[in-house]
Image: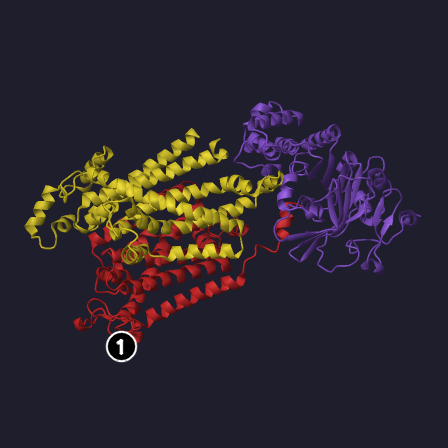
Chain colours: A yellow, B red, C purple
Amino acid sequence: MVLFILRRLWLAALVCLTVLVVSFALTHLSGDLAASIAGPNATAADIAIITKNYGLDRPLVVQFLEWAGHAAEGDLGRSFLYHAPVSGLIRDRLPVTLTLGLTGLSIALLIGLPLGILAAVREGSAIDRGIMMVALLGQAMPGFWLGLVMIVLLGLELQWLPISGVETWQGYIMPGIVLAFSAIPALMRLTRSGMIDALAADYIRTARAKGLSRTKIILKHALRNAAMPVVSIAAVQLGFMLGGSVVIESVFALPGVGYLAWESIIKNDFPVVQAVVLFLAVIYIVLTLLADMMNALLDPRLRA
Amino acid sequence: MSSVGIAQALPGRRRFPAFRRLATLLGVVIVGTALLVAIFAPYLTPHDPFAQDLNLRLIPPVWMEGGQPTHLLGTDQIGRDYLSRLIYGTRISMLIGVLAVITSGLIGITLGIVGGFYGGRTDDFVMFLITCRLSIPLILVALTVVALVGSSLAVVILTLGLLLWDRFAVVARTTAMQVRNLDYIAAAQAAGASRVHILVREVLPNIANHLVVVATLEMALAILLEAALSFLGLGVPPPLPSWGLMIAEAKEYMFFSPWVIMTPGVVLFVLVLGVNLLGDGLRDMLGADLER
Amino acid sequence: MTASLQDPVLSVANLRVSIGGRTEAVRGMSLAVARGETHCMVGESGCGKSISALSVMNLLPRGIIRTADHIRFQGQDLLAMSERQMSRLRGDKISMIFQEPMTSLNPAYTIGSQMSEVLERHRRAIRRQAMDRAAELLARVGITAPGMRLGQYPHQLSGGLRQRVMIAMALMCDPELLIADEPTTALDVTVQAQILRLLQKLQQELGLALLLITHDLGVVARMAQRVSVMYAGEVVETGAVGDVFAAPTHPYTRGLLDCIPVPGKTQTGEPLGNIPGMVPRIPPGFAGCGFRDRCMSAAPECAQAVPLRDAGGDHSYLCRLPPDWTRASAA
């Protein structure tokens, strides 16, 4: 177990390092950064000043080492636009994005798990077909468009929910649903296939031979064994949702990390962009690490 | 008779072939239509999709009040014919879907087969690359690249192609691993076939069915992502009629005339649904079960 | 075939099982198991033994349909029971153990948890009592340090130990009837003998009715008082073990017995018998003897309904041939 965790941690550290390089390379290799910062109306002299001020004339390796060294200490640089430390900007906006992601995941689990279980238990029936159809529809739904349609319909026509902002908790409902939509199909399919496999296992026959109730067989004996891939996919989906918050937050004008990132990209505030990419990647890595550990708790065979 | 015997004796899980065949057929029809529309776009459009006419702004579709038969789906905020723009938008979506999948397929399949077939350290490295790719926030990085390099159709295609290879790699790797241990591979090796020859001539055809299914999934994803990027203003540049861009441009008017966002959204949804239905149908036909 | 036993614990009459309407897996099987008796069902794999047992338990997979004149357990008609009523009986009065000890236990829960839930379900026992009972039974099936085993997971136990756990779990509620479906097939030879000895001991001590499914006539000879030989979904011969072994009358039973070497009887160098061919799949509407394609004594009339013949005592068989045909053919 200890070895397993150590191995995973080592891998996670390597991935972090790679992402660090990628997010640096992303902003430094794909175009003339100084020109991008200066904007379209800048003169050659402006660009030269910017190049000098930001240290962009130094060798890339030096720039990278400096940035990575600071990043490792939690200093992600300063925003050109806000003239403030990037870490502070992210910290201020993180609660909104996290709340949004967790709302989305909760809704997705609340809908995806029961429907997936139901489809598996009634495999091949009209209910199963119907549920799988829902999964297909959800998979094809463009999130940003669904958001707009909901704004028009629920916000404007029916006036049930606020159309933007998070002044009240209701502000999280629509974006939460839209985010959940992106995760439900995968969760549902995986729950279904995991449950079908588990329900066909010999130990389910044993449980039936013991006279256990149907509910107990499905929810205790089958679900526990089907849960592992679901936990993994839930973690991955939460990571994707946080990454996908760029789109949803700009649709609903939510002041989260995603919105910050979008704004920074548009306005060439590259230290922020770099930092958000790195930050989201680290969150994803931590989430999958947590999922692996949870699976070790779920499956005694992995603990040995 | 053991339980295994019983399971084998069962007529197989009930599959409702009629229903599934109908769904697949629907997928084929949708994708086929989109393909034809994309190819023959110039002959199908009633108007020039780029021609502006400020006198004909925001005309609603023909079935709504104030609609005009000359503009079946109405016009946008600067008087361009919606139907014509949607037709040309099909071209962009299909082009991006197909080309991005070809790019990402080449990368992912190569990595996956090499890792799965050779195993050991090579495989560790491929797995590492896949993990890295998955931890990079997709949309954010795509947006950044487009913002820095400059938005154009080619940049969007290339960016998506370079990002969407992970599932190809995962599936190719797993199936290549399974295929590696089969008899005919051993036979080919015994017969002195070179490794590249074995990979290309023996392994690839035998995992092709799985990869075709992945290709449809990725194509659907690429189409959706392009729309999202364009919607955020960092995808296909205006005045190209990308569906995502159409939605973005119409966004300001959606409160007064909601249909402006409805039509491009619906066609986008239908096309992606069609590609997914096609993929599900192929999965059934080719027996490629990706979730196990 | 009617069971002639007085007051059997389990009595099955004319059981038919159809798989998806395409295969007749069991065709009019009848069986009676008496109190405190070991009854062996023997036959090749694929002849309908397990599926008959699962029918009794009503544990058939979906798409498999059972019908019967009656399936009676202690006078109650199991056919008339709802799934809920049936589940109250399973694990309580009727227990079953299976062929695959490696996969029959849930990998996610401890031995103790899986054992105690039987008592919690049927006796409304609290966890502590149930655990005590589980420990007691683990000791009874010959597992050392039962307290430690309760906290272990299935993957930490060997196949033989797991099968012992399965047996102990089946005994949690003091069942009247234990159905054991090839309980030793998946185990090493030495472990097989231990498990069989254990089952025999428990059957005698607890006065269990034991319905033991096996393909091994050696097991039958060792364990059973009565034997039912199954072939292609039918009981082709049944009777007290002594009678059937002494005078096997159905050609299939004879064929099976010829396949095992008997010390002192089988001459060295003399080839063992074998039955050519395989168990056929029986389609709906099949008539006559299912064994006729492999039978040395087959005749045209075997394609018609086969009579059930009495061979004396409780010994009966399903064949056109008279009881003394073996002597006639030997002469």
Q: Which quadrant of the view contains residue C19?
A: bottom right
C36 horizontally vs C66: left or right: right
Give the residue at x 9% y 49%: A47
- Is residue B134 visible to the viewer in this orientation of the structure? no
C144 versus A197 height, above or below = above
Left or right: where A90 falls relative to C160: left
Q: A240 or B97, which is in the foreground?
A: A240
Q: Secondary structure at mark 1?
A: loop
- Disc 1 packing (10 Å; few <14; some 14–19; many ≥20): few
| Horizontal arrangement in the rendering, residue B201 relative to residue A175 (left or right) | right
Residue A72 sits in quarter: top left
> Where does residue B242 sit, x and y in percent of width and height?
27, 63
Please provide percent x and percent y for residue C312.
89, 44
Where is mark 1, residue-wise? B70
Residue occupying the far right of the picture:
C331
On the image, the x and y values in percent for residue B48 come to: 24, 73
Q: Quadrant of the N terminus of chain A?
A: top left
